Amino acid sequence: MAGERDSDFWAKLLALLTFTLGIGLMLLVFVWAAKLFNELGIGKELALQTNPSDRTPLAEWGIRWLIRILLLFALGYIASLIAARGAHFYLATRSQQGRKEGE
């Protein structure tokens, strides 16, 4: 019986660590997104430059911005999957514990 409790503890701990990792990754993605959206002024600076030879093409800037947004979306999605997996794992350990007590 003590071995089962010990394995339940480690399973719950692993589930909570997985959930915490997913939440931490989501927070990191949100910080990156906030930083990215605060850099909006860069496009305005590019458009207002007076020397045309120094000007980076606006299309190139837009493509880089689009790639950043797509990567942030992908990272946020993966982070939410990790957090959800940790929550499901934790709920699975709780339901397993309820079945043992009901026997």
Image (spheres, rainbow, N blue to C red):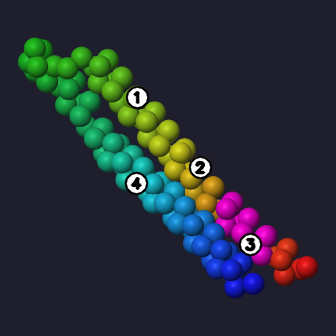
Q: Is residue 40 above or below residue 90?
A: above
Residue 2 in the image, given as x and y percentages of width and height: 70, 85
**Disc 4 residue type (three-letter):** Leu
Q: CA distance from mark 1 to mark 3?
A: 42 Å
Discs 2/4, front: 2
Is residue 43 or residue 98 the one in the foreground? Answer: 98
- Which type of secondary structure does the marked residue at label 2 adopt? helix
Residue that mark 1 sits on: 66
Q: Is residue 92 left or right of residue 66?
A: right
Q: Earlier in the sequence, mark 1 or mark 3?
A: 1
Contact flag, marks 3 and 2 (Cβ < 8 Å)? no
Q: Residue at x 50, y 46 (%)?
A: 76
Q: Is residue 4 above or below residue 31?
A: below
Residue 79 in the image, given as x and y percentages of width and height: 52, 50
Residue 25, can we see it? yes
Q: CA distance from mark 3 to mark 4?
A: 29 Å
Q: Is residue 82 above or below residue 74?
A: below
Q: Earlier in the sequence, mark 1 or mark 4?
A: 4
Q: Earlier in the sequence, mark 1 or mark 2?
A: 1
Quarter of the image containing the C terminus? Answer: bottom right
| Residue 94 marker | 3
Residue that mark 2 sits on: 81
